Image (cartoon, rainbow, N blue to C red):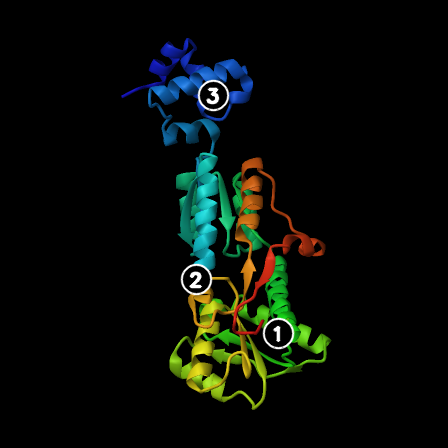
Amino acid sequence: MTSSADVASRAGVSRSTVSQILNGRAHLFTEETVARVRETAQTMGYRPSLAGRTLARGKSDIVITLIPDITFGPPVREFVDLLTEGLAKSGLTNLLRLSSSEHTLQDAIVGLRPHAIVAMAQLSPEEASRLKDQGIQVIGQSTAVQIAADRAIGRLQAEHLQSQGYTRVAAVRPRSKREQTNAPHREAGVIEHCRLHNMEVLPTLEVGLSSAEALKAVRALPAGRVGLACYNDEVALAMLGAAQREGLSVPAAVGVMGVDNSVIARASTPTITTVNINLELNVRELISHIISGQDLQVPAEAMDEYLRGLEVVPGETTGS
């Protein structure tokens, strides 16, 4: 097995130089020396051990992503995939961890000494402070930012439905407890836009993802044209199927709109109008902060810029 001493001998430098260059201190040496050491290490198939790098740097190449207790749907999977790929390009490994007690989280940190923690799950101020005291970078959105994002999604749905001639709108949210972190705020965004533009707000519908529950919700709708702002594309598909089963014309009698721009929306018949969230844009920004070591701060007054990736993807369920 190739050792750092073998690399040092072939590259004509000291073993210490090899160790420092390959463990994050390349800035201490000339570009020529750095290039020669890295090329030699690659040619010889040498990689410093994780334990050695962790000891040298005080932290490992691992980024822990805390996943909240929500449905692991397409948007979360896409976010994780983009984050994992982006971190890998910078030599970092993304390790997923479901949110749990702070004690098990602390155990993981002591054992792994992560480069950073991406908190998709909300940490308490005490937890975040404790992690930072241990020199661990914590990257994550504030609760206020997430609420603002969800309300913006709801407003965008209601705005589109209004543009398609729907003057009566109902928010449709899932019954699942896992989605209750986001669902109320998307509903609030729908209601906010409707009231601001003198649209009739119908009672919010809460459904489980079953044919029976969706049918019950559709049957509760009043006569006349109605627009449905659904929590996500899965809820939208359930409501679309129920409306069709009841013989209601979509979009003439019922307009259906989801969120996520998932395969479900694009593959359904008719295709579902949805809201696309540009995760790639957000992930690039996130990775840049992880690499630079800077905190991710998105003040409330900067939400317009932060949400520039939100856009309506027209489908056949709300008309042309």
The mark nearer the N terminus, 1 or 2, is 1
Tell me if 45 is positioned left or right of 118 in this view.
left
Question: Which residue type carries mark 3?
Answer: Ile
- Badge nearest the viewer, 1 or 3: 1
The mark nearer the N terminus, 2 or 3, is 3
Question: Which residue type carries mark 2?
Answer: Val
Furthest toward the top, the residue is 12
136 lies above or below 212: above
| Distance from the alpha carbon under mark 1 to that under mark 3 | 57 Å
Are there few (<14), some (14-19), or many (20+) residues within 10 Å of tag 3? some
Residue placed most toward the observer, 262 or 266: 266
- Residue, disc 1: 161
Furthest toward the bottom, the residue is 223
| Distance from the alpha carbon under mark 1 to that under mark 2 | 21 Å
Q: In the picture, which quadrant includes the C terminus?
A: bottom right
Residue lying at 61% horizontally and 74% vertically, measured from the top left: 161
Residue lying at 43% horizontally and 10% vertically, measured from the top left: 13
Question: Where's residue 233, x and y in %?
Answer: 48, 68
- Residue, disc 3: 21
Name the element at disc 1: helix
Name the element at disc 3: helix
44 lies above or below 89: above
Question: Which residue type carries mark 1?
Answer: Leu
- Residue, disc 2: 263
Name the element at disc 2: helix
